[in-house]
């Protein structure tokens, strides 16, 4: 597969990158590791005129702890480096587990955390070659008005399959977004949108410069589990990030977030409520799994039926809660 | 020809493959590595709809694009057909998503791609027939205008007296099984480089299982003499039944090259791989089996319908294989078979890894497990009781001169700890057995179904072995070198293999029907014997004895009984080449397995002299909540006749267990609207290193009387056992019969649910 | 729009004029004639295009050539000479890890990057490193054995 033509720019400083982006607007795309973007370009789902390469910008490579109790990870951080970062792994085990679960080692050697956070959504119609897509009517995302993945859907439900996205939401991470003359810190939960086409609040001229993980939240218990057909190189069928503070019998701050099941990470409020009310008892865990299944709205079928995804969601909720409880669930297919 | 085991020097050792160093260092040449002066890049324009009329093709824009050297459509093909029912480039109808409509050649790939996009084709879509049910419905329109319905082919076979045998059965069971389409997924994509710059000379570089078939087909279809076509088959990146013969891209490259007067290379992209692959189609089996109370198998009746996609091409082979092989593994009195190929607007299929028989073996062995269960007989005992044996002649007249099936069953069961495990494993763990067989050195392509080998001797006592047999990874070239070295009494290092160029190598039908080791192996022995005869003349003159008493061993030559007189092999070769007559030594060998009596009107024929047999035992773990299955362990016993190269045999066992596991648990071309929904290695879930099971290998050697050194085959026999072993294990784990492949987590979960009610 | 690029491959420096949209794989094969690196899926799923950059196994099909300026690239041609193969190559050959050979250069490079980083990897580390490669012929079994044996040398 061939790449389309484009102009390549490699700014020497963040400021310069922001300027280039401000000038080019939606004609440009940010190139980090390229492991998602270049595949999409080869398939002609996106054909930017300009690629702005950012992975060598030193401003995006910093990892540091700040005074507000946050660990900041520059968006240019390479995934293999992150996976090996013992300090972060100790503070945020679920985050690092998610990083390690992304794609394959080859891809992690190339990819950046910023690219994973900003990963384009996927669906089985959209992520195909042009020839393949041309066989069907255009969908909401390709300029038409139907959806092939969910027949009859009024909008695009393409899936956010970033492995780290649910963890960021579960841990209440903040995402630092810059555009020329503006710098914002956005809670992860508000960063993602429930829309397959515009799945983050990012404008074309904005760069994610860092993610900020709150040190306090990592200290509670957290877990990440990914179910996929294969281990080692596969997008998730469904994933979960969970967190809770456990003090004796009391369980507070329960957060259950599903990934790879909708256009954004899905926070399971009701299932979490079950645990906060009843604690991490076996019957509450079972019930939370049931509640999770019913709590989910529309689910995209990506090679598996929506019903099966719903089932997996329930299983993951139970597995994650058991893991928080300290009992690692024994079974589970391709768990990462 | 078969000697007793243990007397060999090279045969039966562990030989690293001859081309290992070249391949491991990236110096092995594959088709994409060939760059010719002036070479163009070709690109095929494909139908974006599964069914429709072509109203107009406008190539003018593409032709005007700078860098474009040739554009072809139906008009340039002279009505050329690819197979019996497909126009190379569609005339006025397209029949599947991906059907070849036009093609371009340009100075580079980007330009070719751009030109292809500039070709404007107007279509009038027609309602496609996307399932066999739709295509077989009474009102369904015929997909092809030369047909009145959509039954592309139909075969009935009946052996013995099935009605009588059912009447005599105590227990009859009927089940339906289905298998979803699969993809070959060899690592080297479909690729061709054709040079047809001159009208009477066509050279084609391409990965292939048979240079002979593609050569004769291309010559006859393009109106060339056989000698004007040269096929260069460099290294080939895997085949698994998917590279048997000529495909459309071969002809398209040739026609583009003819028109442009320059060589043209076409390489399929990742998604095109799923349009041209001709992998396994969708199978549906209805199976009815009768047995006696004591477990004696009596009779089987099978109905097969197979989705052949938009074109039949050579899929009729599949129908016949299934019918004549279904009674070849277990003894039975009678059988009946009705097989149909159904045209649909899906991509054309052929078969994937396993000679088209894997689905049938899965169906039969799964049903036998169910029967054994109901009769309360242990599945291993049940198979052992009914297993075919040496000397047995099947209803279709397959004749077993050697047979290690019972030995495979017994050894696999012992090694796998069957007695300790069957029925005694914890919940959601399961164990299952599957058996299989396959002909070795199969015939039926041509009358002259032969392999020929030349062995040329060189001064330093070395030999060059010329063969037309492609090595797609199975290691046949190394096997031939071992056979030649053993026969000539020299070492494998003394042999070099020359292959892959039909201008140089002798005729060989190729690496199909498990012919390599058996047929080309026998030809190699004959060539080596011929070379020895030529050398023996010199030696006999030297020693003053008759040529018949000359012995060749360990690079030495001596009269029988007088090893002390030995001279080196090298000296004898030298003396021969430098004799007054200048006797040039070229051993010539050919082999065509003699056909027995056959009555093809009744499909009765022993289409091979040897058959391989195997048994595999799988142990699985099922996650009852996600439905995911993990194959923990596979015990593999295979009767290969003789392991010529133990390392090579192990590699074949491994590869087939893994591929069989893929077909059973992971791989499925998910179809919708005539399109494969998952046309990439990301979404077509081939297993990877984490999914590798533990493997126990047991090589059974029955020394076949006709095989070279007793060898049969291991090229596709092992995969005949894998699916049903795994399926039976899953069914054992969850207590529900498995009747559909692949056994995806979703299907497993559904089965568990239905059982729970 | 072509840019002049200075590439260091196997310690040799090349000057090439490349368009931005050309991948490292294209340049290695088409401009430098280094055919040992294979062209496969082009989309990150098969690993046949693996080369080593700055010690890590990366996919040349998803790497823009222009992004490689100033980096040290090692391809399969750079790890051995015909007369002295790398121990990993020897182990692959001796242990039957090579069949059709199309996947082999990429897997050898992947294994080299692994063993350079972790000379004694455990089974899971081997699987993790190899998960991005794909071998239809061997079922990965003898490949993993070969890597293991090479690591013990
Ligand atoms: C075979 C294969 C398997 C994969 N499996 C997984 C998987 O299991 N899990 C998973 O999560 N992903 C997977 N991916 C997707 C992808 O490789 C990863 O998500 C990776 O982390 C993306 O990072 P990158 O640096 O390569 O991003 P790029 O491809 O460079 O960028 C991705 C997107 O983010 C934008 N972007 C990048 N950086 C920034 C920034 N700083 N600010 C604003 N926008 C930015 C880009 O413009 C682009 O739209 C897989 C990809 C492949 C090819
Ligand atoms: S989810 Fe529906 S609308 Fe969105 S890209 Fe897929 S087919 Fe198009
Ligand atoms: S060609 Fe690069 S991963 Fe397949
Ligand atoms: S050796 Fe053929 S794909 Fe690996």
Image: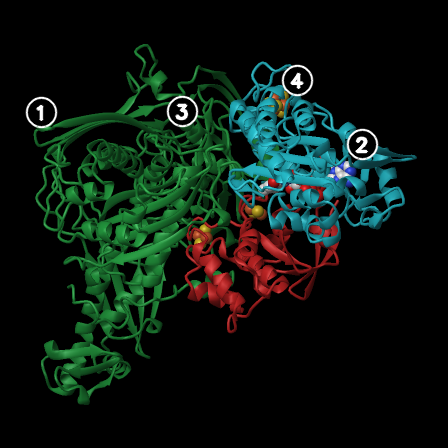
Chain colours: A cyan, B green, C red
Circle 3/circle 1 CB separation < 8 Å: no
| Gap between marks 4 and 3 measured at Cα | 37 Å
Tell me the tag on residue A187.
2
Locate residue A262, reporting x and y percent: 64, 26
The one nearer the camera, A68 or B184, is: A68
Q: Residue under circle 1?
A: B167
Question: How packed is label 2: few (under 14 Cα within 10 Å), some, or many (20 or more)?
Answer: some
- Decide if residue B71 is in sight here: no
Locate residue C44, reporting x and y percent: 59, 44
Q: Are marks 2 and 4 on the same chain?
A: yes
In the image, what residue occupies the spot 50% across and 20% down?
Answer: B56
* In the depicted structure, whether residue B289 falls above or below residue B139: below
Q: Residue under circle 4?
A: A155
The one nearer the camera, B566 or B637, is: B637
In the displayed structure image, the side of residue B187 where residue A59 appears, left or right: right
In the displayed structure image, the side of residue C82 where residue B719 appears, left or right: left
Q: Are marks 3 and 1 on the same chain?
A: yes
Q: Secondary structure at mark 1?
A: helix
Q: Are marks 3 and 2 on the same chain?
A: no
4 vs 3, front mark:
3
Q: Secondary structure at mark 3?
A: helix
Q: Residue under circle 3?
A: B756
């Amino acid at each position: 597969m061939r790449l389309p033509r484009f102009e390549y720019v490699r700014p020497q400083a963040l400021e310069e990158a922001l300027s280039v982006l401000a000038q080019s607007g939606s004609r440009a795309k940010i190139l980090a590791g390229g492991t998602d973007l270049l595949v999409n370009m080869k398939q002609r789902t996106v054909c930017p005129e300009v690629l702005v390469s950012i992975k060598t910008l030193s401003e995006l490579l910093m990892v540091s702890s700040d005074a507000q109790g946050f660990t900041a990870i520059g968006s240019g951080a390479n995934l293999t480096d992150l996976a090996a970062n013992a300090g972060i792994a100790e503070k945020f085990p679920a985050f690092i587990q998610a990083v390690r679960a992304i794609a394959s080692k080859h891809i992690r050697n190339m990819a950046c955390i910023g690219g994973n956070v900003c990963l384009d959504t996927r669906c089985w119609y959209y992520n195909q070659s042009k020839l393949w897509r041309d066989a069907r009517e255009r969908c909401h995302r390709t300029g038409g008005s139907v959806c092939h993945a969910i027949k009859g859907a009024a909008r695009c439900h393409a899936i956010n399959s970033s492995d780290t996205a649910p963890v960021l939401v579960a841990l209440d991470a903040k995402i630092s977004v810059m555009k020329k003359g503006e710098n914002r810190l956005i809670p992860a939960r508000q960063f993602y949108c429930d829309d397959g086409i515009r799945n983050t609040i990012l404008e074309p001229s904005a760069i994610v410069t860092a993610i900020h993980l709150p040190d306090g939240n990592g200290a509670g218990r957290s877990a990440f589990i990914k179910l996929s057909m294969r281990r080692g190189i596969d997008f998730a069928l469904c994933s979960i990030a969970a967190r809770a503070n456990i003090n004796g019998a009391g369980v507070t701050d329960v957060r259950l977030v599903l990934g790879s099941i909708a256009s954004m990470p899905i926070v399971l409020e009701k299932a979490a409520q079950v645990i906060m009310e009843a604690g991490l008892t076996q019957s509450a865990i079972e019930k939370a799994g049931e509640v999770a299944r019913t709590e989910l709205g529309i689910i995209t079928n990506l090679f598996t039926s929506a019903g099966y995804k719903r089932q997996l969601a329930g299983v993951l909720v139970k597995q994650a809660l058991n893991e928080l409880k300290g009992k690692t669930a024994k079974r589970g297919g391709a768990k990462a | 020809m078969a000697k007793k085991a243990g007397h060999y020097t090279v045969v039966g050792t562990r030989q690293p493959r001859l081309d290992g160093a070249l391949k491991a260092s990236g110096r092995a040449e594959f088709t994409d590595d060939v760059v010719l002066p002036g070479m163009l890049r070709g690109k095929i324009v494909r139908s974006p709809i599964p069914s429709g009329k072509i109203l107009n093709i406008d190539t003018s824009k593409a032709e005007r694009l700078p860098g474009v050297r040739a554009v072809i459509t139906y008009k340039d093909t002279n009505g050329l057909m690819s197979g019996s029912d497909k126009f190379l480039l569609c005339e006025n109808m397209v029949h599947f998503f991906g059907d070849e409509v036009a093609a371009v050649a340009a100075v580079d790939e980007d330009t070719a791609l751009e030109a292809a996009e500039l070709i404007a084709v107007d279509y009038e879509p027609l309602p496609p027939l996307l399932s066999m049910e739709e295509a077989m419905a009474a009102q369904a329109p015929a997909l092809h205008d030369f047909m009145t319905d959509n039954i592309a082919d139909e075969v009935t076979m009946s052996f013995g007296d099935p009605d009588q045998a059912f009447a005599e059965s105590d227990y009859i069971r009927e089940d339906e099984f289905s298998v979803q389409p699969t993809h070959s997924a060899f690592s080297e994509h479909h690729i061709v480089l054709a040079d047809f710059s001159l009208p009477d000379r066509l050279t084609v570089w391409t990965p292939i299982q048979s240079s002979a078939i593609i050569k004769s087909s291309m010559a006859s279809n393009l109106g060339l003499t056989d000698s004007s076509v040269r096929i260069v088959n460099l290294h080939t990146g895997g085949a698994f039944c998917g590279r048997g013969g000529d495909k459309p891209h071969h002809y398209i490259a040739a026609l583009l090259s003819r028109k442009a007067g320059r060589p043209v290379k076409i390489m399929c992209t990742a998604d095109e791989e799923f349009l041209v692959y001709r992998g396994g189609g969708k199978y549906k089996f209805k199976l009815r089996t009768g047995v006696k109370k004591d477990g004696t198998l009596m009779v089987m009746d099978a109905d097969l319908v197979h989705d052949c996609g938009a074109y039949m091409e050579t899929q009729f082979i599949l129908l016949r294989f299934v019918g004549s092989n279904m009674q070849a593994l277990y003894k039975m009195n009678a059988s009946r078979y009705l097989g149909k190929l159904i045209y649909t607007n899906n991509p054309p299929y052929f078969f994937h890894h396993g000679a088209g028989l894997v689905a049938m073996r899965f169906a039969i062995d799964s049903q036998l497990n169910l029967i054994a269960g109901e009769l309360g007989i242990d599945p291993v005992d049940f198979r052992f009781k009914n297993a075919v044996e040496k000397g047995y002649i099947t209803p279709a007249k397959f004749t077993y001169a050697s047979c290690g099936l019972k030995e495979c069953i017994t050894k696999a069961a012992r090694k796998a700890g069957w007695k300790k495990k069957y029925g005694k494993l914890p919940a959601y763990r399961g164990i299952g057995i599957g058996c299989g067989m396959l002909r070795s050195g199969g015939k039926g392509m041509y009358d002259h179904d032969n392999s020929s080998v030349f062995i040329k001797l060189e001064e330093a006592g070395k030999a060059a072995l010329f063969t037309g047999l492609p090595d797609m990874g199975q290691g046949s070239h190394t096997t031939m070198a071992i056979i030649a070295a053993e026969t000539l009494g020299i070492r494998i290092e003394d042999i070099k293999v020359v292959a892959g160029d039909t201008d140089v190598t002798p005729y060989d039908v190729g690496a199909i029907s498990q012919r390599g080791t058996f047929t080309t192996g026998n030809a190699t022995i004959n060539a080596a014997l011929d070379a020895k005869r030529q050398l023996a003349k010199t030696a006999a003159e030297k020693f003053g004895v008759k040529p018949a008493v000359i012995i060749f061993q360990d690079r030495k030559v001596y009269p029988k009984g007088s090893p002390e007189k030995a001279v080196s092999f090298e000296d004898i070769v030298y003396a021969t080449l430098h004799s007054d007559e200048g006797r040039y030594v070229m051993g010539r060998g050919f082999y065509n397995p003699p056909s027995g009596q056959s009555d093809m009107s009744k499909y009765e024929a022993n289409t091979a002299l040897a058959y391989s047999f195997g048994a595999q035992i799988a142990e699985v773990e099922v996650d009852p909540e996600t439905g995911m299955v993990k194959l923990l362990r596979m015990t593999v016993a295979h009767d290969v006749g003789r392991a010529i190269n133990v390392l090579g045999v192990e590699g074949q066992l491994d590869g087939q267990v893994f591929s069989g596991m893929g077909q059973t648990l992971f791989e499925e071309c998910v179809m919708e609207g005539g399109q494969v929904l998952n046309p990439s290695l990301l979404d077509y879930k081939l297993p990877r290193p984490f999914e590798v099971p533990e493997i126990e290998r047991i090589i059974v050697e029955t020394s076949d009387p006709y095989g070279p050194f007793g060898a049969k085959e291991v090229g596709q026999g092992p995969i005949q056992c894998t699916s049903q072993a795994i399926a039976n294990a899953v069914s054992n784990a969850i207590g529900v019969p498995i009747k559909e492949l692949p056994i995806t987590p979703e299907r497993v979960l559904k089965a568990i649910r239905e059982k729970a009610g | 729009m072509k840019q002049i690029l200075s590439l260091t491959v196997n310690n040799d420096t090349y000057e090439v004029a490349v368009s931005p949209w050309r991948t490292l794989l294209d340049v290695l094969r088409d401009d430098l004639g280094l055919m040992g690196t294979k062209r496969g899926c082009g989309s990150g799923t098969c690993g046949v295009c693996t080369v080593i950059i700055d010690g890590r196994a990366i996919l040349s099909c998803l790497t823009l050539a222009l992004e490689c300026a100033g980096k040290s690239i090692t391809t399969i041609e750079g790890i051995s000479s015909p007369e002295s193969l790398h121990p990993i190559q020897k182990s692959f050959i001796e242990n039957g890890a090579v069949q059709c050979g199309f996947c082999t250069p990429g897997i050898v490079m992947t294994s080299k990057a692994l063993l350079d980083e972790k000379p004694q990897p455990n089974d899971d580390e081997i699987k993790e490193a190899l998960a991005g490669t794909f071998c239809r012929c061997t079922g990965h079994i003898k490949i993993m054995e070969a890597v293991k044996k090479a690591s013990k040398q």
